[in-house]
Image: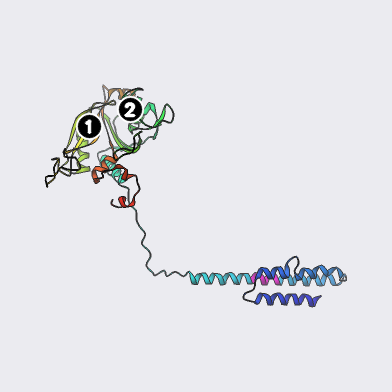
Amino acid sequence: MKEKLERIKEAAMAALSDANADIEEIRVRFLGKKGELTAVLRGMGALSPEERPVIGAMANEVRAAIESAIEEKQRQLKEAVMRMRLESERVDVTAPGEPVGCGHMHPLSKTQREMEDIFIGMGFSIAEGPEVEYDHYNFEKLNIPKNHPARDTQDTFYITENILLRSQTSPVQVRTMEVQKPPIRIISPGRVYRSDAVDASHSPLFHQLEGLVVDRGITMGDLKGTLELFARRMFGEKTQIRFRPHHFPFTEPSAEVDVSCFVCGGTGTLENGSGCRLCKGEGWIEILGAGMVHPSVLSGCDIDPDEYSGFAFGMGIERIAMIRHGIDDMRLLYDNDVRFLEQF
């Protein structure tokens, strides 16, 4: 039986020395349940008590030798495969790499940053608030009670009867006045929502930047000076503004604010005599609404309107971006068309 064990060991080593050897097949052939070494061990019952320990020890040595040889063969094969991969997948680190495209800020984000920088330079701070808002803050605290006709122009998306997606960032102004007493000087940029059909100038989601100043002695002149400075820094030093009477429930008096067209210089015509496409020949472009904060709004926030006054304004960031860059369709800002966006 010793000779048989030696032959098994030699046969296994010879099989493993073959470069194309199937290791799993060899393992099953010699060490499997029906393998040659197993068959020898099953015949140990016919040996004398004195031979069994000797043959058993030798059989264990043969098993260990074959298992060790199999592990070594597996290691060699793995190393060979790795060498082949390293050779076939070699990378020339000195070769020039492929250029990686670099993105840039979206025109809406860029416009918002520019607007924020202008107002921060005038001493304003940025205030933020929730986009999912209470009807109480979005309408009622802004002097727009239930069934007020002004709600029709600011129809939004309701989650419940009293919870909605804000239709303006004005609720941020109210929340600020509730927790901060004058002097107040803030801007509140952010997303707003209205139930509008999508077209070239409307979207159910858009962005606003609103401002609020409350202090003693604030007048309409302060409002005009602030907006005039903003317009000159945003559209050019020669830009002028004009106020047209309007009505907003939360300001009194109220005004629509226009800027002189920076393409035609406010004349309505170009040098070649044709009408200006940007201002449609009018010489002025409407950009925002503004006015003095209504006394009822101040009182509702526990600010004495006899002691304090303030002004507020609000403008669409999309509109400012479209005017600045000559964009004639608001949908282009949301289509994610790289051909359009890479122009900026």
Q: Are marks 2 and 1 in contact (CB under 8 Å)?
A: no
User: Is residue 69 a member of the stretch shown in magenta?
Assistant: yes
Question: Residue flagged by tag 2: what amino acid is it?
Answer: Asp
The residue nearer to you, when weighing 217 against 160, is 160
Return the x and y of residue 112 as percentages of the image width and height.
30, 42
Q: Is mark 1 on a helix, strand or loop?
A: strand
- According to the image, label 2 marks what residue? 152
Drawn side of residue 330 relative to residue 57, left or right: left
- According to the image, label 1 marks what residue? 256
Return the x and y of residue 286 as percentages of the image width and height.
22, 36
Which mark is nearer the camera, 2 or 1? 2
Return the x and y of residue 45 as percentages of the image width and height.
85, 68
The residue nearer to you, when weighing 209 against 196, is 196
Q: What element carries label 2?
A: helix
The residue nearer to you, when weighing 308 against 141, is 141
The residue nearer to you, when weighing 271 against 19, is 271
Q: Main secondary structure of the magenta part?
A: helix
Q: Is residue 90 above or below residue 182?
A: below
Question: Residue flagged by tag 1: what amino acid is it?
Answer: Glu
Drawn side of residue 216 relative to residue 40, left or right: left
Give the residue at x 20% y 35%.
258
Sequence-wise, the earlier of marks 2 and 1 is 2
**Quadrant position of residue 224:** top left
**Quadrant position of residue 126:** top left
Return the x and y of residue 154 as percentages of the image width and height.
33, 30
| The magenta segment | 66-72
